[in-house]
Image (cartoon, grey):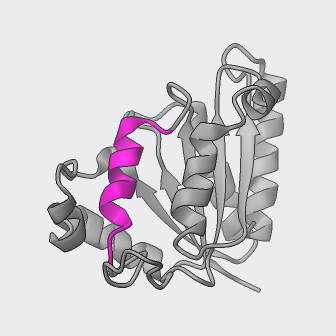
């Protein structure tokens, strides 16, 4: 069954040329070949301020770039978020984007402190995370904390499931063979819309 897939490129360098950009492109290529519609949101190219107050988060209007991203993501069945692990978590620009994006009215209904309605039910997601350390070390020793917050406290809390994670470790200095393997894996996942 064909899906609408939104790929959120979370690498903060708008210049491109990083493994994360190639992974997102490979996923998109596979998705299109699999008959899926693809929408790309490149966070590094968006203009938005950081949120600084609870009042702005709960009652402020999203800036135009965020409102457009919300429109694109509302119509998507599956989100793919690609980013490098920086200091154990998402780069600050991606975190700022997610804070702007996941406001009341988009991710949750109202501001009820108990348990607001989850507005992203019926959507699934995949997190694709690149890192310099071994992925197994990140998962076992660090318990993947910097990725689990995004999976559990943002996406699943908003109703998205399943949320799958692809961790790619030791990406710096790896040869062309490893890179080709990762790109083939992303293309295959894209083709299946997973």
In the figure, is residue 14 to the left or right of 5?
A: left
Q: Position of residue 70 (x, y in %)?
A: 36, 73
Say which quadrant the C terminus sits in.
bottom right
* Depth order, front residue of 79/57: 57
Q: Is residue 20 visible?
A: yes
Tell me if residue 72 comes above or below residue 186 in the rendering: below
Look at 79% across and 34% down and name the residue there: 180
At x 49% / y 56%, what residue is drawn? 8
State the residue in front, 39 or 157: 157
In the rendered image, residue 191, in percent from the top left (x then y), is placed at 77, 66
Tally the numbered discs: 0
Q: Horizontal and vertical percent for residue 49? A: 18, 49
Outermost residue toward the front?
114
Q: Quadrant of residue 106?
A: bottom left
Residue visible at 71% across and 83% down in the picture:
2
In the rendered structure, which segment of residues is drawn in magenta? 90-104
| Residue 101 is inside the magenta segment | yes
What is the residue that sits farthest to the top in this orientation? 173
In the shown orientation, is residue 187 left or right of residue 95?
A: right
175 relative to 69 in the view: left or right? right
Residue 23 visible to an observer of this rendering = no
Q: Quadrant of the N terminus?
A: bottom right
């Amino acid at each position: 069954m064909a899906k609408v897939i939104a790929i959120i490129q979370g690498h903060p360098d708008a210049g491109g040329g990083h493994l994360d950009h190639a992974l997102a492109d490979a996923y998109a290529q596979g998705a299109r070949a699999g008959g899926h519609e693809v929408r790309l949101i490149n966070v590094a190219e968006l203009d938005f301020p950081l949120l600084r107050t609870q009042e702005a988060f709960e009652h402020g209007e999203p800036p135009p770039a965020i409102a457009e991203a919300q429109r694109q993501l509302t119509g998507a069945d599956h989100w793919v978020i690609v980013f490098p692990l920086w200091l154990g978590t998402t780069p600050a620009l991606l975190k700022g984007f997610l804070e702007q994006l996941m406001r009341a009215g988009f991710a949750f209904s109202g501001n009820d402190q108990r348990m607001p309605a989850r507005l992203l039910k019926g959507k699934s997601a995949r997190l694709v995370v690149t890192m310099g350390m071994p992925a197994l070390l990140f998962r076992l020793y660090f318990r993947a904390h910097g990725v689990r917050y995004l999976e559990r406290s943002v996406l699943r809390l908003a109703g998205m499931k399943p949320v799958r994670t692809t961790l790619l470790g030791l990406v710096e200095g790896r040869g062309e063979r490893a890179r080709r393997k990762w790109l083939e894996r992303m293309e295959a996942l894209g083709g299946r819309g997973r």
